[in-house]
Image (cartoon, rainbow, N blue to C red):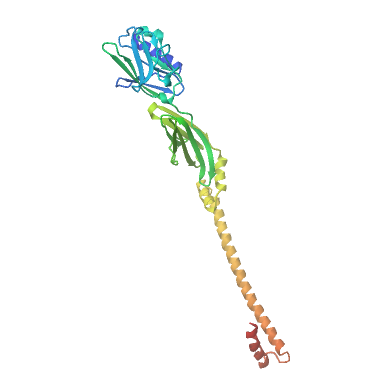
Amino acid sequence: MSTVQELLSFCFCLLTLSGITLGLPNGSGVVRVVVKEGSDAILPCSLSNKENAESKLFDWKKDGQKEVFFYDAGLHSNNSRPGQDQQFKGRVSHFQDELKYGNASIIIRNTKVTDRGDYSCDFPRLQPRQIFHIQLVVGAAAEPSITIVDVTEFGVLLQCEVRGAFPKPTVEWQDGAGNKLPAEEPQVSEREGHFYITLQTTVKKTENNRFHCVVQQDDIGHIISNNITLPEKLFEDTCSRGDVTGWFLCGFSLGALPVAAVLVLLVATKFITVRCNKGAAEERQVNGERNRMTFSTKLEVESNPHAPPGSPEQGNSYHKDLPELL
């Protein structure tokens, strides 16, 4: 391994231990630096011939306009040089002891998402002129939070919330085996350069009842997840909610065939009740007709008490009085 490679490896180890992420060239001459919001970012810039830069002039700018840091033979933005953009005041410094090795790198402390962008390190007086380009990516990805929203006859409704993420992540639900679960349309909002995402899904009983909310940011190669393990009782409670249809579906989803048998018994009971009510109505109708006949016969006897039973006198009295009573 060459001396340069050893130095690079050593520097990378120091930066890793200090929580600072240093980028590498992406093939187009642009160095990409990726850091987490709130951490420090080192933007590298070194003369190709390692010439002493203590007496040189170099100028750092963001997006070609904002003054980030200016140095000219010992005078710089942090001692007497005016013009530094307000965004970077008090947060940017250089490595004074490294200037003699041609190192004009700077460090931006306590990075914010708004610091992301394209930076340039320019040595305008050198012949030939040297300009270095660095792309700073400031990522933010809080651990997703999981809550139980509701328990219904369809399952357990889970909600995953991602707050203040950047760049915009993709969020999905997975079961314990890592399979993607169907979910509702995510609710996405953006505030001050950060994304807030809410994603809900309804889950049913599985082998281990464990479910994961996975947040992935491909732009910065970052992935983070959280998980929840649901107790068996929650899925038992889904069977106690809803109407008979819900019980029926839940019974079969849990393999509880006795529930179906109970439903058959309920239907049979209803049929028997209907039959009993019908039979009682028929009996009341027969009894009503019998009582009416008895009452009519009594009237017939009272109209001619001295006539022998079945005589014409009784018969005439019956046919005469009955229509008036009815």
Whether residue 1 is visible here, answered yes or no, is no
Residue 109 place in picture, x, y as percent: 45, 18
Name the residue furthest right: 306
Quarter of image, res 140: top left
Q: Is residue 295 above or below residue 147?
A: below
Left or right placement of residue 65 versus residue 199 in this view: left
Is the N terminus in the top left, top right, bottom left or bottom right quadrant? top left
Write the residue at 42% across / 22% down.
35
Quarter of image, res 166: top left
Quarter of image, res 314: bottom right
Whether residue 120 is visible here, answered yes or no, is yes
Write the residue at 55% across / 59% down.
267
Left or right placement of residue 188 versus residue 265 in this view: left
- Total labels drawn: 0
Nearer to us in this view, 213 or 273:
213
Residue 215 place in picture, x, y as percent: 44, 32
Residue 39 place in picture, x, y as percent: 45, 20
Name the residue furthest left: 128
Q: Is residue 145 above or below residue 34?
A: below
Is the C terminus in the top left, top right, bottom left or bottom right quadrant? bottom right
Left or right placement of residue 139 versus residue 245 in this view: left
Residue 45 place in picture, x, y as percent: 35, 14
Write the residue at 32% across / 15% down.
122
Nearer to us in this view, 195 or 212:
195
Nearer to us in this view, 24 or 307:
24
Q: Is residue 3 above or below residue 276?
A: above
